[in-house]
Image (tube, rainbow, N blue to C red):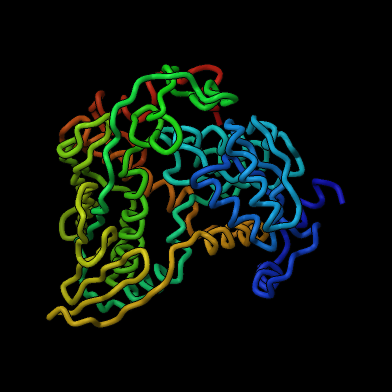
Amino acid sequence: MTDSSRRTFLQTTSLAIAASTASAGSTAPPSERVRVGIMGAGGRALSLINSFSSNKSVEVVAIADIDPTRLPRGLAQAAKNQGTTPRGESDFRKLIDDSSIDAIVIGTPDHWHAIPTILACQAGKDVYVEKPDGHNIVEGMRMVEAMRKNKRIVQMGSQHRSTERLQSAIAYAKSGRLGRCTVAKAWESTKQGPVPAVADSQPPTGVDYDMWTGAAPMRPFNSNRFHGRWRWFYDYGTGDLGNDGVHRLDMAVAVFNAACEAQGDQPLGMPNRISAHGGKWYFDDAQEFPDTLQANYEFGSDLATKLLTYEMRIWAPYHYLEMSEGAAVFGDQGYIVIGNSNWKAYGRRDEVLAEGKGGSHEAPHVQDFVECIKTRSKPLCDLETVGHPASVLCHAGNIAARVGRTLAFDAKTESFPGDDEANALRTRPEYRKPWVLPEV
């Protein structure tokens, strides 16, 4: 079977076939398996390697990583699960150029989400990309444009969307038992440690630090700006708002939208006003993003106005509303609190009206992506309608915190009307060549 005919077969295979092979635990024949290339071999990428190579409808055929010390573990994990060893690469572009690969999985730092996603879409491949969608608003917009123009399936890695736990919470909100809902909240109160300053040094032996830096400014190597801790620095990450906050905000939006549907209101869409207050008020260390933050997002107008608030206290050693991190939607008849392993709905006198349980592992999210590759259906965390809007909340919240004022937001242009300082933060001042953001 040629590459083109096999790709056509994958795109027309029925959902029933995908579901039956997965539920039966049998491995699909090679011609029916989705051939996947994975970018990254450590951190979140290693978990994705495990989940994709464990899926009976998938074959992981290649893994790329700039760190030769991480690659062997990723290859070994895939081989253990699927019985065949993927080939290892140091340059992700070899995965994009491989016409036999159907989908690219991106488990990299935030500053390496957009360019591979766009290139993969342009090469006719579907994409699973970790959250948030890009390093900034413009990158996410360009990713959506590439997905739409090339008619690709792009699933963002907010895996909670595919869990039975969140889907059952959504179903409860759709019942209308919360009453009229106008307010929601998301929060992080899980204690994290400081990032002590360390001296610059030489990159680890064998690491392609130039490629790791990518579009970001070239700076001396520093272990704080590398594996694990890159997310706390403006050049590469999006802080804890884009790390964990994107999950909680998306959970709040999902359930809030279900409540809106029940009461006959329009979905939230994009916010029209954003404010954020906070800063580095607890840790005296090297990280650049706030450790304390409250961001407010206003949607709609007049009697249809909705408010979503995000609170971050990454120094707090206790729970809030019984959850260390979670989301809540408040109505005039009751409210619902959603965490990582359960949810509870409460009535007028705080009696428990309903509850649900379930995990937050990404395996169902991976399965949803694989099924959508075969059926060409929209995934549960479709980039355009779910993933990018959730990411914009994170990016816009960070921008409002940096400029220190309330911002008006134009949903059509995804910009801040009349605010040059805020608009400058919608993208990078400059993309370091050759890693410029591709035109679509």
Instruction: Name the side, left or right, on which 266 lies relative to 162.
Output: left
Q: 111 left or right of 47? A: left
Location of residue 424 by image quarter: top left
Q: Residue at x 82, y 51 (%)?
A: 5
Residue sitting at the far right: 1
Compared across the picture, whether 366 is left or right of 195 comes to right
x, y percent for residue 305: 19, 56
Q: Residue furthest left?
A: 349
Residue 400 to residue 367: above or below:
above
The foreground one among 418 and 104 is 104
**Position of residue 390 measured from the top left corner of the image (x, y, whole percent):** 37, 49
5 or 323, which lies in front? Answer: 323
At 74% from the left edge and 65% from the top edge, which residue is drawn?
A: 27
Question: The C terminus appears in which quarter of the rendering?
Answer: top right
- Classify residue 147 as left or right of residue 237: right
- Residue found 28% across the figure and 46% down from its top: 192
Residue at 19%, 75% (x, y): give it: 334
Residue 2: percent from left, percent from top: 85, 47
Residue 196 location in percent, x, y?
28, 31
Towards the viewer: 289 or 192: 192
Q: Is residue 233 visible?
A: yes
Q: Does 407 sit above or below residue 337?
A: above
Residue 151 can be seen, yes or no: no
Quadrant of residue 29 within the rendered picture: bottom right
